[in-house]
Image: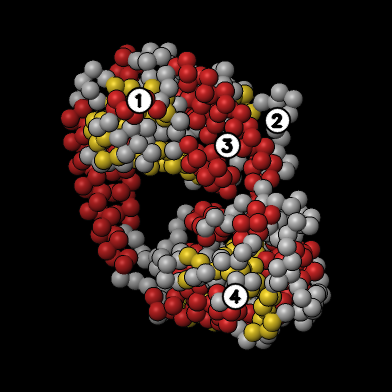
Amino acid sequence: MKTRIFLVIGIILFNYSIVLSQELGTARIHTQKGNLKVFSSPELFPLTTKWISEYNKLNPGLKIELKTTAEMDLKESLNSGETLGFVSDQSVSQVKNQFTWNLVVARDIIVPVMNESNPLTAEICRRGITSEGIARLMETPLKPNWRMLFANAQNINEQPVHYYFVNDPELTAAASNFTRTKQTAPAGIKVASEAELIAAIQNDPNGFGFCRLTQATDPQNKNLAAHIKLVPIDKNGNGRIDYAEAIYYNLQEFSRGVWIGRYPQPLSGKIYSVSSVKPKGAIQLSFLNWVLTDGQRFLSSNGYNDLVLNERQSQLDKIIEPQVYASAPTETNPFLIIRILIILAIGVIVVALEFVFRRVRTQEKVGARFTSTLLEVVNEENIAIPRGLYFDQTHTWAFMKKDGLVKIGIDDFLQHVTGPLTRVVMKNTGDKIKKGDHLLTIIQNGKHLRIYSPVTGTITAQNKELFDNSSLLNSAPFTDGWIYTVEPTNWLLEIQFMNMAEKYSTWLKDEYLRLRDFFEAAVRFHVPAFIMVLQDGGVLRDGILGELGPEIWEDFQTKFMDVKK
């Protein structure tokens, strides 16, 4: 029966691939044709022009008309039939009530920088600087020193600081908004350009100044320019860089911190696409899709920063329609559509029958002893902990079978934190893995976590049922929801670093406290109104992470999961 089912599925998929290739082959020869009207605020005209130029190269039959708000008032543009607009934060304030739809497409990030060889680097990174401190520095014409930049820093020596600045209206406005000053001509050393500012600070251990993040970045290695260091900002003015402000380890961590709101808003502008109504035409949606994907590579050369992957995906989700084409849609053969629908219907029936047969067989073989049920609250006392398994600190388990192969999966604690999972991304049979390596990606409606391996070895089998029914990781994490079998290469040594039931249960108590600390620090920062009792014996709801956005999943990955791999 199983062989016949797979044979039928194979024939269906082969037939469908032929039909699909015919349809796609026809579609590839077409590019977009038609008209697209775009407007931009003056400061975004060079970037918008570049986007249109590059998009026209891909779609030469498309006519794009571009106007700036210097030619036409922004309010008039939104009401005159212009389809899409590109505006910055400073322009959005003019028309807050004029548009009903917007999409973030880029960021304009301004950063304070210093020389990495500054004698006070360690103290600066520990304390961070404050907006009030920078205001004092900008307003002090004679002998400014680093003590001015800190709150409550009497023990900091009065080492001189050389404040470099550029006469750039956008930089000046951002710095003034951040420091809440009206300084149009700050005290310091004036240089002609941001490039000169970076060069000056690279050669001056006491140098300090504001520039765009793109200017402080080496485009070759996608890292900070040589001898340049970002200056941490003490947002809450408590005299130290605490958990919510610790985003300055590297550019990736910093960019993510900007997205999730850990960086001062006056220094982090957004670039929007706006419209009086949500765009629905294929041409408009395809252009926006391109801007959020391939179009991101043209941002840096124009002084702007691309979006981090998760933010980009969240914005793409706002423009997803039933049909969005990279090129204009073509006429479809109705007989092909009928044929595809018939093939898909047969495929669904066959897969459903196979699923039923498998479930019946599974129920005959596996009891419900270690299935997991939905809990009202989650804590260390109501987590399933089967005996005989080895549990790793990465929230995975391992069990050696009689044939010497090791079966591995995720623990009950983790699935109760994430809530129902919707998809998995797995490694292939034959892949070699090491303890602590990326093993699996679990996904819930686009939000994802990387899971790390508890053992070293070669994957000998996948649990293919997870591709169609990833919720098995929730309902039966120790039985039907296993992930791989692995041929281990260092089993006896690696199990020395794992715990079995009793010790694992004790370890979970500390892990639960760590989880509470995470949500107290991270969730309250991101979602102030989130209803959760953490004091006086408070509890966490089952599936608590599943209720929260992708930025907190990212935080959970780096601050909770990755520190234990």
The residue that mark 1 highlights is: 495
The residue that mark 2 highlights is: 534
Quadrant in which the C terminus is drawn: top left
Circle nearer the viewer, 4 or 2: 4
Q: Earlier in the sequence, mark 2 or mark 3?
A: 2
Up the image or down, 309 lies above or below 355; here it is below
Q: Is residue 12 left or right of 252 when viewed as pictured?
A: left
Q: Is mark 3 on a helix, strand or loop?
A: helix
Q: What residue type is labelled 1?
A: Ile
Residue at the spot 26% in from the left edge and 40% down from the top edge: 432
The residue that mark 4 highlights is: 204
Circle nearer the viewer, 2 or 1: 1
- Image mark for residue 545: 3
Q: Nearer the viewer, residue 439 or 223?
A: 223
Up the image or down, 229 lies above or below 519; here it is below
Residue at the spot 25% in from the left edge and 57% down from the top edge: 21
Quadrant in which the N terminus is drawn: top left
Label 4 close to label 2 by CB (< 8 Å): no
Q: How far apart, in angstroms, are the residues tagged by discs 4 and 2?
A: 48 Å
